[in-house]
Amino acid sequence: MNRRDAISRVALIMGGTVLGAEYFLSGCKSPNSQVSDLFSADNIAFLNEVADTILPTTAGSPGAKAANVGKFMAVMVQDCYKAFDQKTFLEGITKLDEASKKQFNSKFMDITAAQRTELLVALDKEQKEFTKEREKLVDADKLKHKGEPFYFANEAEIPNHYFRLMKELTLLGYFTSEIGATKALRYIAVPGHYDGNLPYKKGDKAWAT
């Protein structure tokens, strides 16, 4: 699967565009990204656990942590996100931990797998509602400045939800990794001729190639 196809699939799953897609396709590096390292080893370990809760190990494929998606997220946020989205993402690590403490009286790293799933399902519902309201604000902002050439909504004042960013990067990182492409999806290094009528049964894995 190439990067463009992966972004298209993630956008389809998420029901919208993927943040930073223009940078992902051009190879990054955002002109507004910070130069210094933004993530500690603990941050990456934390993100690996979040990703593994979103895409856990199954009987047929390893989970997101096996693909080190946490490190992928750190690299993409540092190299491909604008400064205000980097800030949203980094603050999101603390907010996710705070949500865990509020719901289970423990940090995310200390709660059970079932509790992690319950928490992230709730956060996913929250981000969907948040995103709907954000889109309304962006549309209203555009309408307010209708007719102004080259106007773009001030995204820094209308931020994204941190968990949406984490989920997008989890999906993108996993399905473009070797593990995701060859274990979760079906992969043939040299596919050969095109067959537009290949048999497909319900439950078959999607193709990575």
Image: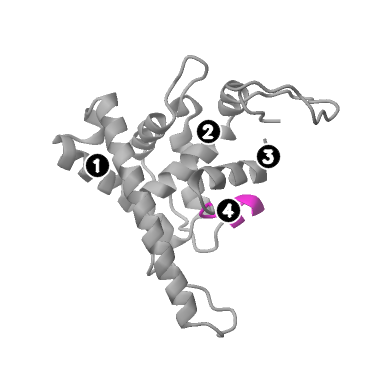
Q: Secondary structure at mark 2?
A: helix
* Mark before the other along the chain sequence, 2 or 3: 3
Residue range corresponding to the magenta coloring: 18-28
Residue that mark 1 sits on: 97
Three-letter amino acid code at disc 3? Asn
* Mark 2 touches mark 1? (CB < 8 Å): no
The image position of residue 9, as x and y in percent, is 59, 42
* Mark before the other along the chain sequence, 1 or 4: 4
Three-letter amino acid code at disc 2? Tyr
Q: Secondary structure at mark 3?
A: loop
> Does the stretch in magenta take in 27?
yes
Above or below: residue 143 compared with residue 106: below
Residue nearest the observer in this picture, 124 or 92: 124
Residue nearest the observer in this picture, 31 or 182: 182
| Left or right, residue 98 beside residue 31 | left
The image position of residue 87, as x and y in percent, is 37, 57
The local crowd at label 3, few if under 14, some if 14 to 19, many if 20 or more residues have their Cα within 10 Å, is few
